[in-house]
Amino acid sequence: MRMLPDYQLFLSLVLAGLKLSLVLPLLFVCLALVVAIPSAARRGKLHVPGYMGLVFLTFLSGLLLGRITGIRAINGTLAGVFLSILFFLLIATAVGSALALFSYRNPHQE
């Protein structure tokens, strides 16, 4: 049975809408991490080597998890979805920590 292109588009949009309930909260949490970490740096909550360590640790572990998630045996399973979510959270933490280096304010300077 051959589907018409309009039905294929509709079917793909319906199936993508089911995944939207997972993607939107993940998007908001990642954006919150990217905003919260530099704002904490602006208040001087951690020192510069701490933010550098967070950048390297979360970036490397995120890349490792992304590589593991791409394995054919894990892709599409519940463990794969969990590892994908963890990957995005780690990369958002790495981006937020990198931005924190630019907005860091030493609390002893004031």
Image (tube, rainbow, N blue to C red):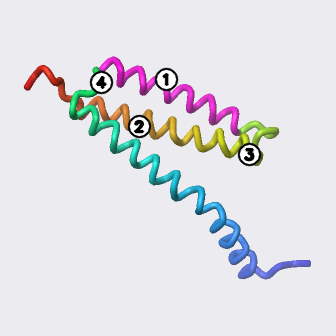
In the displayed structure, does residue 95 sit left or right of residue 72? left
Residue type of the residue flagged with mark 1: Leu
The dominant secondary structure in magenta is helix
Please report the residue visible at 49 percent of the width from the left and 28 percent of the height from the top: 58
Q: Earlier in the sequence, mark 4 or mark 2?
A: 4
Q: Quadrant of the N terminus?
A: bottom right
Badge 4 element: loop
Distance in Å between CA atoms under marks 4 and 2: 16 Å
Residue type of the residue flagged with mark 4: Leu
Q: Which residue is mark 1?
A: 57
Q: Residue furthest top?
A: 49
Label 3 neighbourhood size at 10 Å, few (<14), some (14-19), many (20+)?
Answer: few
| Residue 103 screen position, x and y as percent | 23, 34
Residue type of the residue flagged with mark 2: Val
Q: Which residue is mark 2?
A: 95
Residue type of the residue flagged with mark 3: Leu
Q: Which picture quadrant has residue 23?
A: bottom right
Q: Earlier in the sequence, mark 3 or mark 4?
A: 4
Q: Start and end of the magenta stretch?
A: 48-69
Q: Earlier in the sequence, mark 3 or mark 1?
A: 1
With respect to residue 67, does 8 lie above or below? below
- 68 part of magenta stretch: yes
Badge 2 element: helix
With respect to residue 65, does 3 lie above or below? below
Q: Which residue is mark 3?
A: 78
